[in-house]
């Protein structure tokens, strides 16, 4: 039987699929580069051609996930007929909905070690991938809001950066949820995360000159639903 030769893009996508499944199954820290190569069923030379390191593979996975999420969020914005504030809230809500639909809680659990300080450099690269995709859309929504006299800011892109920066700042709170050793500790960590998200929402309200509570943030029920989807075996 002749050997099937697949297009390099197809083979690369298959390796990413298998790597993602392996990380979810075992956790990022428990998967070595040799494990990834063996599971992919390719030679080391072929694997290194696409992914010269484990970090490069993680970054490629992040890029693919970010692109898929961005397309879904773009669709949600296009389907929102309301004001710029409605579209901003639709964007923020869609970000959560898309992540839940795409299994991000499981992926997050598998990659939780990337949120820790010792992996800040790699995590910064991963965050930048998503931020660079989303920033122009977020900036556009805010700019239109300024034109509509709904938002009041002299720097729409700066506000977009601030929103993304606040989102990245909750890493330590997410880690606290994972690190909780019992239900009481987990409940407290969820309370802290929910409170911090509320504070971030109020910050954006005031920067944009909006009444408090205008910008949508995750409530405790949504945070709980995200946490409930997290595996606890890593």
Image (tube, helix red, strand yellow):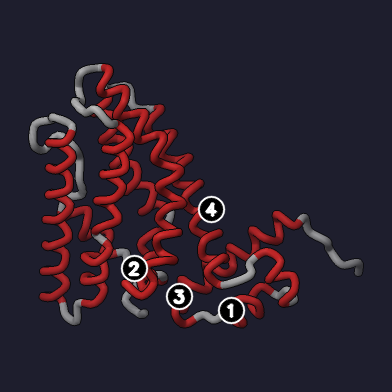
Instruction: Give the Cα separation between the discs numbered 4 and 3.
Output: 17 Å
Image quadrant containing the N terminus: bottom right
Viewer can see residue 33: yes
- Residue 115: mark: 2
* 218 in relation to 234, above or below: above
Instruction: Give the Cα separation between the discs numbered 1 and 3.
Output: 11 Å
Q: List x then y, in percent, for residue 107.
A: 42, 65
Please give the name of the residue rendered at 27% of the width and 25% of the height, measured from the top-left corner. Answer: 84
Instruction: Give the Cα separation between the discs numbered 4 and 2.
Output: 19 Å
Crowding at mark 4 (Cα within 10 Å: few <14, some 14-19, many 20+): some
The kind of secondary structure element at disc 2 is helix
Marked residue nearer the N-terminal end (4 or 3): 3
Marked residue nearer the N-terminal end (3 or 2): 3
Decide if residue 187 is on the left or right side of residue 48. Answer: left
For the image, the number of numbered tags is 4
Q: List x then y, in percent, for residue 218.
A: 20, 49
Crowding at mark 3 (Cα within 10 Å: few <14, some 14-19, many 20+): many
Instruction: Give the Cα separation between the discs numbered 4 and 1.
Output: 20 Å
Decide if residue 110 is on the left or right side of residue 153. Answer: right
* Residue marked by disc 4: 64
Marked residue nearer the N-terminal end (4 or 2): 4
Marked residue nearer the N-terminal end (2 or 1): 1
Residues 20 and 140: in front is 140
Please give the name of the residue rendered at 13% of the width and 29% of the height, measured from the top-left corner. Answer: 209
* Residue marked by disc 3: 28
* Residue marked by disc 1: 33
Image quadrant containing the C terminus: bottom left
Viewer-nearest of discs 3 and 2: 2
Q: List x then y, in percent, for residue 51.
A: 63, 67
Please give the name of the residue rendered at 33% of the width and 29% of the height, measured from the top-left corner. Answer: 141
Marked residue nearer the N-terminal end (1 or 3): 3
Please give the name of the residue rendered at 62% of the width and 82% of the height, measured from the top-left corner. Answer: 34
């Amino acid at each position: 039987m002749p050997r099937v030769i697949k297009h390099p893009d197809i083979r690369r996508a298959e390796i990413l699929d298998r790597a993602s499944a392996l990380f979810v199954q075992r956790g990022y820290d428990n998967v070595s580069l040799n494990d990834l190569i063996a599971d992919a069923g390719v030679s080391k030379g072929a694997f290194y051609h696409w992914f010269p390191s484990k970090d490069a593979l993680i970054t490629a996975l992040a890029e693919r996930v970010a692109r898929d999420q961005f397309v879904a969020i773009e669709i949600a914005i296009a389907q929102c007929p309301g004001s710029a504030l409605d579209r901003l809230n639709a964007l923020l809500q869609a970000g959560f909905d898309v992540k839940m639909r795409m299994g991000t809680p499981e992926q997050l659990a598998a990659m939780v070690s990337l949120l820790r300080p010792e992996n800040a450099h790699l995590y910064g690269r991963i965050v930048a991938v998503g931020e660079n995709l989303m920033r122009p859309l977020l900036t556009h929504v805010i700019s239109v809001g300024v034109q509509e006299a709904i938002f009041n800011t002299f720097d729409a892109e700066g506000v977009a950066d601030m929103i993304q920066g606040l989102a990245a700042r909750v890493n330590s709170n997410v880690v606290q949820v994972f690190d909780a050793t019992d239900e009481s500790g987990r409940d407290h960590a969820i309370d802290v995360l929910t409170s911090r998200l509320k504070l971030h929402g109020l910050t954006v309200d005031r920067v944009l000159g909006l009444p408090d509570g205008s910008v949508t943030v995750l409530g405790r029920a949504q945070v709980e639903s995200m946490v409930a989807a997290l595996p606890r075996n890593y």
